[in-house]
Amino acid sequence: MLRSELANQGAAPKIARPVPLRESVFEALLELILTGHLKPGQHLAESELAGLLGVSRQPIREALQLLSGEGWVDLHPGHGAFVHSPTVQEADQLLAVRTLLETESAKLAARHATSEGVQRLRALCARGLAAMEADDVDESVAVNSELHAAVTELSGNKVLTELAAQVARRVRWYHTPVARKRGRASWMEHTELVDAIAAGDEERAADVMRKHTEHTRQSYLEQRESEPVEAAPEPMRRRRPRSPK
């Protein structure tokens, strides 16, 4: 009775629960994948990961299952877990969708951006340029993601923001290998984008974003073309039991 009375009065606070260890391990491993510290095709030994993160093998095993479910890790029976190696087609399709979403985001951001929003974008550009000058690829990629997310938020379209967020992590993964190559050109394009948004020029903002995302897409595809093709690991063969003598 007490429970129902408190619920009806809205007086029953929810008790915050600690994040399960497997989810913390999931986020830690995903960050290592996104930043390229765990590379596509790399074998993920549970014992080594457990030692690296200071946990037991059980949450590592559970986190690898979660990562597999989201396409970040491939599980090969009898062979172990490996960082997923995206195909060129996977990357091309995702980056093409990104271009569509973010071009519309830029157009709407130019229509709805506030002075505070523009100041935030300029601050992010400054951080990104500083990271690029310091050759800090991890920071540059992280700030790049923040800036694109901020542009989408300024669009004022919640559905668009949700859709863009769904592909943002994987886009970050594809951007990391070419971040150094894109370098200053990428941040100059960002600056041009922010100028267009500040001026309220919807068409120019959309055009700059479209070209910017296409440059990243082409850079990634060109890099993949130059990489050697590696075959997927073959599953281990089970040994046949010896026949009794």
Image: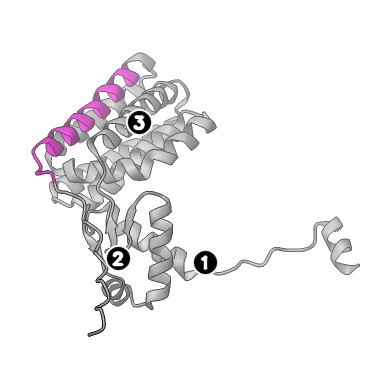
Residue 228 in sight in this render:
yes
Q: Which mark is residue 98?
A: 3
In reply to whether residue 112 is colored magenta, the answer given is: no
Labels 1 and 3: the sequence-earlier one: 1
Question: Callout 1 environment at 10 Å: few (<14), some (14 to 19), or many (20+)?
Answer: few
Q: Which residue range is magenta in the image?
A: 204-229
Q: Which mark is residue 78?
A: 2
* Apparent side of residue 224 relative to residue 94 in the rendered image (left or right): left
Q: Name the outermost residue toward the front.
A: 245
Tell me where residue 240 appears, x and y as whole percent.
26, 71
Vertical side of 224 occupied by 139: above or below: below
Q: Quadrant of the N terminus?
A: bottom right
Q: Which mark is residue 19?
A: 1
Labels 1 and 2: the sequence-earlier one: 1
Q: Amino acid at mark 3?
A: Arg
| Residues at marks 1 and 3, CA–CA distance in whole angstroms | 31 Å
Element type at marker 1?
loop
At 19% across and 36% down in the image, what residue appears? 220
* Apparent side of residue 118 relative to residue 217 in the rendered image (left or right): right
Tell me where residue 222 appears, x and y as whole percent.
13, 33
